[in-house]
Image (cartoon, grey):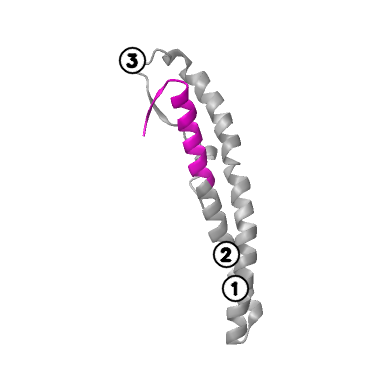
C-alpha cells in the first residue's frame, strides 16, 4: 500500500564526516524515530483510517454506478473494495511523508548533516 518506512526501519542518511556530534548519532536516531512516529500518526493507523473512509466513499459511488446499470449491490461492493485500497494507500503515503520529514528535521535540528 504505502512505503511504510516507519515500519521497515527506514532512517535518514547522515554524513558523519566533520560532525562534532557524531558520537550521538545512534542515540539521536532512536529519539528522533520516536518523535517521528508520534508526528506522523503511525502509518498503520493512518492507512486503516484511510481504508475506512475510502471504503465508505467507494461504496456510495459504486452503488450509484451499480444502480445505473441495474445492480447497486455489486457496484457498492466493488466501489468499497477499490475505495478502501485507494484510501489506505493515500493515507499511508501521507503518513510516511510526515514521518520522513519529521525524522530528517529532528536529526538536522540536533546538528547532524542529513543527506536528502
Say above or below: 114 vs 46: above
Say above or below: 69 vs 4: below
x and y percentages locating residue 13 in the rendered image = 39, 29
Q: Which mark is residue 18?
A: 3
x and y percentages locating residue 41 in the rendered image = 60, 41
Q: Which mark is residue 45?
A: none
Secondary structure of residue under mark 3: loop
User: Which range is magenta?
Assistant: 95-116
Q: For the residues carrying marks 2 and 3, which lies nearer the camera in this image?
A: 3
SS majority, magenta: helix
Q: Sequence order check: which comes first, mark 2 or mark 1? A: 1
Secondary structure of residue under mark 1: helix
Which residue matches tag 1? 61
In the rendered structure, are the residues bearing label 2 and label 1 in contact, judged by CB atoms less than 8 Å apart? yes
Task: Examine the structure image and report whether residue 73 is included in the region drawn in magenta.
Answer: no
Decide: few, some or many residues near mark 2? Use Cα within 10 Å; few <14, some 14-19, many ≥20: many
Q: Quadrant of the C terminus?
A: top left
Whole-number angstrom distance, CA of label 3 to CA of label 1: 57 Å
Amino acid at each position: 500500500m504505502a512505503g511504510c518506512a516507519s515500519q521497515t526501519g527506514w532512517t535518514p542518511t547522515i554524513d558523519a564526516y566533520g560532525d562534532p556530534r557524531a558520537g550521538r548519532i545512534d542515540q539521536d536516531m532512536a529519539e528522533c524515530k520516536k518523535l517521528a512516529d508520534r508526528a506522523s500518526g503511525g502509518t498503520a493507523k493512518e492507512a486503516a483510517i484511510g481504508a475506512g473512509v475510502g471504503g465508505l466513499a467507494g461504496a456510495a459511488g459504486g452503488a450509484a454506478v451499480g444502480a445505473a446499470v441495474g445492480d447497486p449491490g455489486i457496484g457498492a461492493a466493488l466501489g468499497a473494495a477499490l475505495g478502501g485500497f485507494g484510501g489506505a494507500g493515500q493515507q499511508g503515503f501521507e503518513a510516511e511523508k510526515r514521518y520522513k520529514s519529521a525524522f530528517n528535521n529532528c536529526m538536522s535540528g540536533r546538528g547532524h548533516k542529513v543527506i536528502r
